[in-house]
Amino acid sequence: MKLVAVTSCPTGIAHTYMAAEALENAAKKKGIALKVETQGSVGVENELTAEEIREAHAVIIAAGANVSKERFEGKAILEVEVAQAIKDAANIIERAMQLEKKDLAQQVETIKQERSAERTGFYKHLMSGVSFMLPLVVAGGLIIALSFVFGIEAFKEEGTLAAALMQIGGASAFGLMVPILAGYIAFSIADRPGLAPGLIGGSLAVQVGAGFLGGIIAGFIAGYTADFLKKTIRLPKSLEGLKPILLLPFLSSLFVGIMMIYVIGAPVKSISDALTGWLQNLSGTNAALLGAILGAMMAFDMGGPVNKAAYTFAVGLLGSNIFEPQAAVMAAGMTPPLGLALATVLFKNKFSTAEREAGKAAWVLGISFITEGAIPFAAADPIRVLPSIITGSAVAGALSMAFKATLRAPHGGIFVLPIPNAVGNLGGYIVAIAAGTMITALLLGILKKKID
């Protein structure tokens, strides 16, 4: 077993080298091969090579200063204080030996959890609402698709199974979509006092025709109103219990309701109607251009704010029976990990052994519509990987829109493709995904350098 380590202290003088010596002595006693890179006041000494990092079972970072971890992507990392390495080096070596290397799926899950924890402000609240809304959209979209098995117009005949399926998926699941979105945006802002006014505001957004956009606005108004009242209203202790039960839901719901009916509803409805009309009339070059933009956004930060903006835009249109952007977004989101996986097969001499192993997992992540599967590859070589995946995703999105492919489910990857009528123009949709994947792989083959 081989280990590598980096030591660094704030001043870069004594402790950096004391920690290195302690770790080396402890590893020698255990018969473990260890190389330590020191980052002291004179700069980097005994620098770790790419080959040494690849061969290492784990990485020890004993530092009191910032140490970049980008080159250790995919490796098990043990981070400790530099003083701890001096005092207890033997235990640190033992702990590093017991670490398990993270596979690509584990890395991606960690990345997603870290991103979720980093969300703040507007983005955090919006994504909270979207995450609670998504199960309704998924269930509703697929149940509606099942109703079409009996014929596109079959649901219009009352008493039939097709009509029942449309009632479950369309009237019920999709009917709750906007209220749940608004309710949980408000809940994220004001906690429980925001839920009732948010749900009411979202329901009013549907009633006045303001749709998805109106629901987002209603959620934020309800949340910030409830939060303001919660912090502002002061009651005697004997009456404090009335505030969350009576005053906050009453006042905040009244305010958001009046705002939606008399102030916000009509203008937002006009904007929503104009956007819906424009999207329904898109064709040819304009449709392909929109698909290319959405596709590039999906690959730009692979699950970050730009990616989520494109995804939320497409999901919001499902309630307006516009399904083409959702197809483009999912095709473009599948392409980055699929393209990287294909590149590791076609151009093996341009990827390390660890990256080729990660490529096997990238196939699964790609077909599951987990764009974050491309992040470890992009972090290791952003200059070459990012242009490749952005181009491939833009092509996938553009072709999907040009072929007028539609998608009624906002997630699921290839696993929703066999469901009858879940995807419109299935052949063209598969061609779009395949073309984006191939272009991503070919660009990686051209741009990436051979590994010696």
Image (spheres, helix red, strand yellow):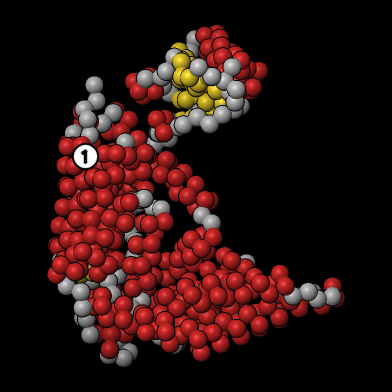
Nearer to me, 408 or 339 = 339
Name the residue: 16% across, 52% down: 435
Say left or right for 348 vs 382: left
Mark 1 nearby-residue class (10 Å; few <14, some 14–19, many ≥20): many
**Residue 97 shows up from this direction:** no
Q: In this view, does 415 lie above or below 344?
A: below
Say left or right for 442 vs 174: left
Name the residue: 32% across, 30% down: 354
Q: In this view, does 313 lie above or below 304?
A: below
Q: Where is residue 36 in the image (x, y as percent from the top left)?
A: 48, 16
Q: Is residue 110 above or below residue 53?
A: below
Q: In which quarter of the image is residue 17?
A: top right
Nearer to me, 397 or 25 = 397
Q: How many labels does the image show?
A: 1
Q: In this view, does 252 lie above or below 299?
A: below
Q: Give the residue type that dot 1 points to.
A: Leu
Q: Is mark 1 on a helix, strand or loop?
A: helix
**Residue 325 shows up from this direction:** yes
Name the residue: 28% across, 85% down: 155
The N terminus lies in which quarter of the figure? top left
The C terminus lies in which quarter of the figure? top left
Nearer to me, 365 or 294 = 294
Instruction: List the residue tagged with mark 1.
Output: 444
Name the residue: 31% across, 56% down: 297
Q: Where is residue 196 in the image (x, y as percent from the top left)?
A: 59, 77
Q: Position of residue 9 (x, y in %)?
A: 58, 23
Q: Where is residue 319 in the image (x, y as percent from the top left)?
A: 36, 76
Residue at the extreme front of the image, as rendered: 42
